[in-house]
Image (cartoon, grey):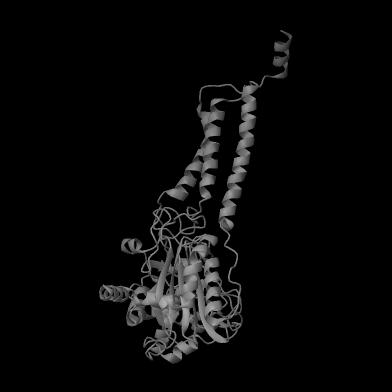
């Protein structure tokens, strides 16, 4: 019997995944396992996936929480996630491939490579907006970020985005003297996508798959949602915890990348030397190029390399980036000296404060550098949610007052039921049209029927309150048409009636 028990024990140990055994011996993994349920609840985040980099390789990947609040499906480590602006580092690798092959000069004007659109300015010299400055966010350009779209909308072209025809994001212009200060610009990365496509003559996705993803062995990487990817992905959620569906950015280069967390972590790990002496860049880029990318660029305050964010934590250089799109938040942080770091993705608009908490937990545990572990949770409403509530509240308060006056007028006999007439129905028409348009704007597919500059509001749950208030006004307007005011009598007529 003891021999049988020993054999069973050995068999069970053999079946335990190696990364799970590594987690048991990993202080950070143990703290994550202990604290993550509470952190998810405190920050109102349904689920998250964490990949841990040790010795320049992915040591383990762990999933926490739920992937979909409607179905209750558990988050799985292999699920597809969106990493938002973390993908700007991927774009930078694509640009640096062109630099290494001599097709792009890092310090040449970006306009030299742009065929479809040119940077123009009456105040600044556009030739000072170089490729390097686009990568380091020192090109002086506007447009820090761009709105995304549901599949029911036509995506604007890159030119339309740069011209300001991407919802309410504005035109990409030079607002500051190029090369003098750091101003984060997603617009600059739209230009970098255009450079890659105009120089190579192929799509951004095709070039990146061949030149970056395939050589690194990142098989799950993609840039656009498909039904198959949606089936393999976690569900993104808005601030109130409601699913918002799979939305798409019009530019891939600014943060549209989709992959498993482990695959994205493999890409980040390629920033440093691998566990078996594999060079930084893993053959896609030279170690010298990668070193330049993680070196502080001029006039960035030491906070930016070429797309990489930089910081000194625990005496070592770390590279990092945060990323978010509607319903997603992600980040990575990598200590380049220790070759150790964390990649994390969440399926929630509230994920930023959770990411900060986990980052600080890692800094405390792995680097021994004390920071505040528990930042305050995110604002669940946000500006758009508060604006929708204010509009709905104003409409509701005005409706309540109008309904009260209407009721008093009926009670006093000032209003009496009458047959409907076209003139009275015309009074209902504006409210009915407004309610119908609002319903159409939020709920009905309208691919190509509204301009791309028209903003989307349907993912905001508070928009439903505006809809309810508008419908209430339609009902009240119909009631007022059914109970019109009694005609006023001339003073002389009223006097005769009184004396009679």
Hey, which quadrant is residue 450 in on the image? bottom left
Query: Can residue 353 be seen?
Result: yes
Name, please, the residue furthest toward the front: 1
Quadrant of the snapshot with the C terminus: top right
Q: Is 407 placed above or below 264 here?
A: above
Hey, which quadrant is residue 364 in on the image? bottom right
Q: Is 379 placed above or below 420 here?
A: below
Q: Nearer the viewer, residue 103 or 55?
A: 55
Q: Position of residue 414 (x, y in %)?
A: 64, 22
Q: Is residue 491 left or right of residue 260?
A: right
Q: Position of residue 70 (x, y in %)?
A: 41, 53
Q: Position of residue 98 (x, y in %)?
A: 40, 85
Q: How many marks?
A: 0
Q: Nearer the viewer, residue 186 or 330?
A: 330
Query: Can residue 172 be seen?
Result: no
Q: Is 49 placed above or below 129 here?
A: above
Quadrant of the snapshot with the N terminus: bottom left
Q: Nearer the viewer, residue 332 or 483?
A: 332
Residue at 60% x, 73% y is 175
Hey, which quadrant is residue 61 in on the image? bottom left
Q: Position of residue 405 (x, y in %)?
A: 65, 30
Q: Is residue 219 left or right of residue 105?
A: left
């Amino acid at each position: 019997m003891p021999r049988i028990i020993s054999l069973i024990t050995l068999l069970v140990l053999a079946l335990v995944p190696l990364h799970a055994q590594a987690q048991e011996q990993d202080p950070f993994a143990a703290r994550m396992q202990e604290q993550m349920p509470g952190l998810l609840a405190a920050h109102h985040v349904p689920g998250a996936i964490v990949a841990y980099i040790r010795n320049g390789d992915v040591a383990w990947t762990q999933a926490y929480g739920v992937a979909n609040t409607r179905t209750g499906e558990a988050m799985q480590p292999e699920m597809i996630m969106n990493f938002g602006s973390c993908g700007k580092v991927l774009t930078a690798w694509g640009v640096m491939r062109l630099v290494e092959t001599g097709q792009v000069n890092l310090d040449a004007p970006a306009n030299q490579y742009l065929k479809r659109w040119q940077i123009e300015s009456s105040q600044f010299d556009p030739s000072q907006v170089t490729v390097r400055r686009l990568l380091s966010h020192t090109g002086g350009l506007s447009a820090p970020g761009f709105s995304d779209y549901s599949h029911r909308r036509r995506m604007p072209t890159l030119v339309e985005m740069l011209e300001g025809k991407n919802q309410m994001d504005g035109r990409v212009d030079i607002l500051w003297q190029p090369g003098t200060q750091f101003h984060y610009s997603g617009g600059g990365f739209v230009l970098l996508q255009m450079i890659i496509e105009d120089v190579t003559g192929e799509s951004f996705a095709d070039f990146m798959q061949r030149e970056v993803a395939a050589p690194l062995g990142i098989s799950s990487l993609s840039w656009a949602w498909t039904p198959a990817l949606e089936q393999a992905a976690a569900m993104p959620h808005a601030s109130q915890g409601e699913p918002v569906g799979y939305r798409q950015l019009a530019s891939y280069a600014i943060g549209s990348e989709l992959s498993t967390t482990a695959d994205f972590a493999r890409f980040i790990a390629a920033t440093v030397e691998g566990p078996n002496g594999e060079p930084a860049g893993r053959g896609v880029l030279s170690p010298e190029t990668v070193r330049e990318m993680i070196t502080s660029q001029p006039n960035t305050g030491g906070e930016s390399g070429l797309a990489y964010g930089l910081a000194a934590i625990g005496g070592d250089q770390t590279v990092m980036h945060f990323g978010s799109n509607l319903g997603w938040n992600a980040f990575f942080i990598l200590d380049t000296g220790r070759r150790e770091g964390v990649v994390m993705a969440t399926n929630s608009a509230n994920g930023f404060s959770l990411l900060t908490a986990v980052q600080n937990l890692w800094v405390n545990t792995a680097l021994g550098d004390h920071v505040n572990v528990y930042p305050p949770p995110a604002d669940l409403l946000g500006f758009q949610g508060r604006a929708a509530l204010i509009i709905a509240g104003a409409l509701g308060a005005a409706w309540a007052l109008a309904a009260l006056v209407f009721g008093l007028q009926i009670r006093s006999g000032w209003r009496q039921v009458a047959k409907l007439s076209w003139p009275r129905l015309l009074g209902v028409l504006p409210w009915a049209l407004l309610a119908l348009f609002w319903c159409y704007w939020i709920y009905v597919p309208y691919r190509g029927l509204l301009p791309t500059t028209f903003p989307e509001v349907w993912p905001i749950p508070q928009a439903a309150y505006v809809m309810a208030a508008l419908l209430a006004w339609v009902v009240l307007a119909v009631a007022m048409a059914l109970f019109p005011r009694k005609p006023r009598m001339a003073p002389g007529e009223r006097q005769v009636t009184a004396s009679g």
